[in-house]
Amino acid sequence: MNGLSAAIQFAVKEQLDSINKKLNCVCNYGKYLLERRIHGRYYKMILLFYNMFSQTVDINGKETKMGVTFATVKRKKFLLEKLLVTGYAAEGKSVARQDGKVYFIEGAVPGDVVDVFISTNKKDWGEGKVTHIHEYSAERTTPFCQHFGVCGGCKWQMLPYEKQLEYKQQEVAQNLKRIGKTPLPEILPIIGVVDTIHYRNKLEFTFSNKRYLTSEEIKTLAPPLPKEGSLEQSESENLSTIEMSDGQKKFGDSWSDGALGFHVPRIFDKIIEIDTCYLMDDVNNTIRNTIRNFAKENNYSYYDIKQHSGWLRNIIIRYCTTGQLMVNICLGYEDETETKKLLNHLLQKVPSITTLLFTINTKWNDTIYDLLPQTYYGKGFVTEMLEEFKFKIGPKSFFQTNTKQAEKLYTVTKEFAQLTGKEIVYDLYCGTGSIGIFLSKGAKKIIGVEAIPEAIEDARENAAINNITHAEFFAGDVIKICNDDFFAQHGKPDVIITDPPRAGMHEKLVIKLLEIAAPSIVYVSCNTATQARDIGLLAEKYSVEKIQPVDMFPHTHHIECVALLKLKN
């Protein structure tokens, strides 16, 4: 830079200072990663930046070293020690208080004394996760699943089932009173399940070339950190992740060849390797482990969600109370020879399969609703029963995932509807028509409305299978469909059944229901918070007559709730 004017030299120096500040930010992040023992490509990235920019530059004839330093990252996250958990909050979290501040905690039970890592820290409240338990609550019981604490599916296994029901009842009452802010009757006792394991009729497992490692596994697999301040090339090679064929990776001398199981909560690209799952009959374990073993023997590649490569993607299992078993294997691309080999092997090892399908999915996402599953063996569908009613379920059909408890839920809905055979019933968010068909014997007419055309096709077919001629199903937005011309043709509703998704009803639909002013509304919900919100809006014209919680999913915080609303005056 000799010979340049002072102004130019000053400008260049300013630019270098700006770069210097940015590099310090990068290296601070590197220090943060190192402190948290995050290795692999992150470490290599920081090393690259360090080597590139910790160099000397010539400024006005003098060698100046760019001052890149590692600094401690200041975080609002912190550890609370020996915190007494005093109660249950909602959505599976417990609650504790300290110095007038409320903390919502994952992984704790009321009565526990715990250390909590606070990850969200606001003025009046915080959220965190248990890192250590000093004293166990008397309410605790021993979890039955080896994957408890890692898999996010059954977070309440440490609670006796009676306590789970108690806390679910409590959450229903709190949400309806606090959010709904409308007069309520006494809430009926929650209806529990008989079988708290093997209750699901549908499960989906995912293949991934990236297996989620527990903290214990990381300690055994990861090499030691370099000495502080030492960033030699040999150490960086020791820390780096070595990419292997078919997405395999090697940490030291331990191999990982991907995983088949469930997604890690809040981590989209890693899968927990599931050995035994208690959500469905043991047949699910037989199917999954048979496919996994065969895949390893034949060196089949697992899907890489980031690179969009790999062959095996998903397994979807549907096991009905009728004994019919449907398996759909989703593949990343066509390979006729290997597909036949895999499917024939599965049929040989699991002869109880009544329908076997495969779906070629070349998209970036895992949804199959815009794809065409191909039947390899069987009819391509299964039949489920709710009381005496039959339901045809295809690979893309929606159906309640707990069949036995769905019967209880629909029985409550039927009782609340108080049908005499003279009523016109509108079934909103009708899906495949299961509630309307279940209620059909007591109704004069069933009108089902659903936004998804494929679901309406299933509903019409299910009505035909059960010889129900007084039920009609329509695809479209209920706000647009339910106009004066529609009522003139089909009649105004005497009873409205609404079973919306977790987000609840759209505000425009609530306004529409107030406009329709049917004598009765039976609101079936899988989220009492949004149900309470909607009931509060409907309180302009409706009063709540009955509330019945129903537990559909043991060992989880999810609750179904049925509310009967009557038109005032």
Image (cartoon, rainbow, N blue to C red):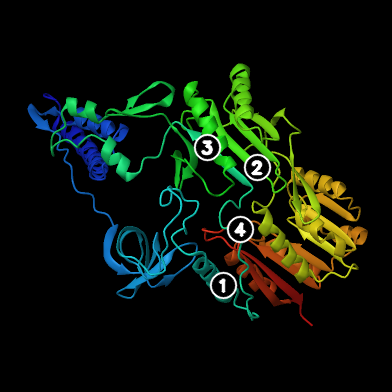
Q: Secondary structure at mark 3?
A: strand
Q: Position of residue 462 (x, y in %)?
A: 81, 47
Q: Secondary structure at mark 4?
A: loop
Residue carrying label 1: 179
Say which residue label 2 marks: 318
Measured Cα–Cα span from mark 1 to mark 4: 14 Å
Amino acid type of the residue tagged 4 in the rendering: Ala
Tag 1: residue type?
Ile
| Number of the front mark, 2 or 3 | 2
- Left/right placement of residue 353 relative to residue 77 reads right
Q: Which percent across, then down, holds residue 390?
A: 80, 49
Mark sitting earlier along the chain (2/1): 1
The local secondary structure at tag 1 comes to: helix
Q: Amino acid at mark 3?
A: Thr
Measuring 64% from the left and 56% from the top, which residue is drawn there? 501
- Give the CA separation, mark 2 to mark 1: 37 Å
Which mark sits nearer the N-terminus, 1 or 4? 1
The answer for how far apart the CA atoms under marks 3 and 1 are is 37 Å
The mark found on residue 503 in the picture is: 4
* x 57%, y 44%: residue: 282
Label 2 crowd bin: few (<14), some (14–19), many (20+), radius 10 Å: many
